[in-house]
Amino acid sequence: MGRYLGPRCRLCRREGMKLFLKGERCYTDKCSFERRSYPPGQHGQAQVRAKMSDYGIRLREKQKVKRMYGLSEKQFRRYFDEADRLKGLTGTNLLVLLERRLDNVVYRLGFASSRRQARQLVRHGHILVNGRKVNIPSFLVKVGDVIEVREKSRQNPFVKESLEGVARRGVPQWLELDPDGFKGVIKALPVREDITLPIQEQLIVEFYSR
């Protein structure tokens, strides 16, 4: 299946929580999830009362994280297989790999108001890693990497607007932001405690291990 092009707020309602897919809009009263927090569709309100099977619970958790990071099923499964090969807990390894993606780091640093917008910035060559242009959203950052907005792109209204709202979202402890210099540094690799999103990664492991 190709990339999802439908309404993004519909995905939040389907998963029963805000996935923050539309940037600053998600923090306002215009957020569709705030007005209609039940699943989309004709029978959405009835689904709230319906009991979900164990398979359904695990499926929804996997779908939630996949949509949160904006990945296809094939991409997500590849990350899971890589996490399974690494030492340690597979679920934690999976989340760390997803957090290390360049588009996610650009979003976490506040250069973009959503991961979708961050992915676009990366693909269009607005982001430098250690002084070199990297246009691959899935590029995995490592400790010591310097992520910055290209000088010619620093007047981009989307970047400036996003940086103004970064205080509301906060910057993770494993990152260090220099807003005046439009750059950030990877101080350390993220650990599970740094990932404060409401994710139950063990359910994803159980889904793929069934």
Image (cartoon, grey):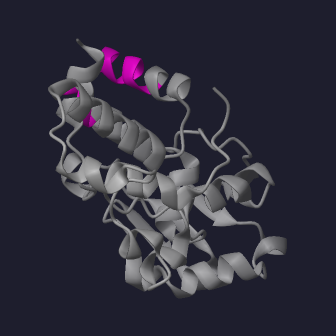
Which residue is most to the top?
210
Side (left or right) of 100 relative to 162: left
Coordinates of residue 163 in the picture (x, y in percent): 56, 81
Relative placement, left or right, of 64 versus 6 is left
Give the magenta range.
Answer: 79-92
Q: Is residue 131 visible?
A: no
Q: Residue at x 59, y 39 (%)?
A: 139
Q: Position of residue 159 (x, y in %)?
A: 67, 76
Question: Is 142 situated left or right of 80 in this image?
Answer: right
The residue shown at (60%, 70%) is 111
Q: Give the answer, above or below, for where 198 lies relative to 50.
A: below
* Residue 150 image offset from top left, x and y in percent: 76, 66
- Left or right: 102 in relation to 128: left
Q: Is residue 178 above or below residue 198?
A: below
Note whether 61 is above or below 41 in the view shown: above
User: Residue 156's x, y, as percent?
Assistant: 77, 78
| Quadrant position of the N terminus in the picture | top right
Q: Which quadrant is home to the C terminus?
A: top left
Based on the displayed image, in which of its 4 quarters is residue 146 positioned?
Answer: bottom right
Q: Is residue 140 above or below residue 128?
A: above
- Quadrant of the rendered image containing residue 194: bottom left
Is any part of residue 91 visible from this angle? Answer: yes
* Point 47% across, 80% down: residue: 166
Q: How many marks?
A: 0
Q: Residue at x 69, y 41 (%)?
A: 136
Q: What is the magenta segment's predominant secondary structure?
A: helix
> Does the stretch in magenta take in 157?
no
